[in-house]
Image (spheres, grey):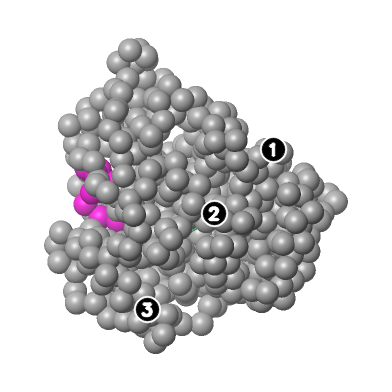
Amino acid sequence: MNSGVAKSHYLTYFAQMNYISTRGGAPSASFSSVVLDGMAPDGGLYLPGEIPDVTGRLPLWRSLGYRELAAEVVGLFADLPQAEVRELVDRSYDAFADDEVVRIVPVGGMHILELFHGPTLSFKDVALQFLGNLFDTLLERSGGELNILAATSGDTGSAAIHAVRGKKRLRIFVMHPKGRISPSQELQMTSVLDENVFNLAIDGTFDDCQGIMKSLFSDVEFKTRYSLGAVNSVNWARILAQVVYYFYAAFRVMERTGAGRVRVSVPTGNFGDIFAGYLACRMGLPSDMLVLATNENDILARFFESGTYSAGKVRETVSPSMDIQVASNFERYLFYRLGCDGKRVETLMKEFASNGRFTLQPANAEFGRGLIVAGSGDTASTLLTIRETYERAGYLLDPHTAVGAHVAARYMAPEAPMIVLATAHPAKFGATITDAIGKNIAHHPVIDRLTGQPTRCRLLPAKISDVRSFLMATLDRKI
Ligand SMILES: *Cc1c(COP(=O)(O)O)cnc(C)c1O
């Protein structure tokens, strides 16, 4: 859909957004440095110093195509000329199968927002294609280089690799938990043989990988010496790119149904995607509810039900990209929930680090109560949802999206149609599709082409020192 809005009608922004840390102990920073640094030097995550109220712009935003809308949203937060933002957006989304980037399909009373039409067939492409090109632009400008270190529970790694491969100012090192991601997820990463791509299979869980990454990043001297950067959803630019589709989908579904507001269900792992939705709501998205849907790794669902945040053991499920107990982006939400008190965030995160738990008073109205509701779905309900949706509507959900649809069913309301974020194409999870409906009918040429490709990967123990040595050995040779 093309809006036909003339170029001269684009809004231009001159505002210079400053960024602050969730732990309140870092100087405020610019968009460019926040993108390149990933995490704040005090161990916190960056957030914009203020959340713009876009209520007045909604009538204009409604008329925009996806790319135009993306340029508008990004322009509010980035210190780049608007023409450069638009060029970045176009370059990023040219890699998608659809000009409008996403598709919205009505299925059994819900609206499935397909976010998986990028090169690796997961929603992570939406943010990472943008981030890869943004890095390129910023490094071109500064003349620098960046070595990206990432931990993946499946989809981030391949999306990041495909966003960075072949870019000459960037190298990428991706840790994945060995044997705990789907075979096609693994192949999507290890079959990329570009010189600037390094796959590391870690003998442990995703939380181990994330722990190693966090501790290497917290060593400021090491991080600086080797120009380490992050693409995990702690990177602000990813959250920002995800804010866009909440608005886009709400407009389309409101047009289609005549409703004045929507609800959005979000299959959740690291809390990045739903945090983008939370920000969108605070900016003025006409949505009265965000449904946080988890699998058996339900630390977040338990928190929103009881106020207690307590880590359990990671369990392997059929939705592996959500097999996460410690959700990095949750800290960003906590910051707002605690009235923007960085010191309290720091105290709670320390309490969590030493005791594995903390408890908050029930949310007050302003900072979340009622807006975010939560629930979880187990393997049986995920498989059942895939099967029933296929039988009744002829539509095939991937297991992550099925968790979202399953939990969403509890929160349907006639006045606010439900959007379910479809975070991956079912062809990425063929074995689970077979379990659900008895045969594997989920195919996609991107996945089918992977079979038999040559691969490259390095196996390492789940130890900080081993990963550190590998990075040093590789980078000392190059620099
Ligand atoms: C990453 C991922 C999720 C979870 O998103 P978060 O931003 O980490 O909450 C859900 N589904 C799929 C397919 C994913 O790749």
Q: Earlier in the sequence, mark 1 or mark 3?
A: 1
- Relative to 344, residue 146 above or below: above
Q: Earlier in the sequence, mark 2 or mark 3?
A: 2
Residue type at tag 3: Lys
Q: Earlier in the sequence, mark 1 or mark 2?
A: 1
- Residue 31, horizontal then vertical, whole percent: 40, 42
Q: What residue sits right under mark 3 in the picture?
A: 350
Residue in the image at 23% along x and 61% along y: 340
In this picture, residue 183 sits left or right of residue 424: right
Mark identifier at residue 427? none
Residue type at tag 2: Ala
**Magenta region: which residues?**
280-291
> In this view, which residue lies farthest toward the left?
365
Would residue 88 be counted in the magenta stretch? Answer: no
Q: Secondary structure at mark 3?
A: helix
Q: Residues within 10 Å of mark 3 (few under 14, many from 20)?
A: some
Residue in the image at 68% along x and 67% along y: 468
In this orientation, which residue lies closer to the viewer: 172 or 154?
Answer: 172
Q: What residue sits right under mark 2 in the picture?
A: 230
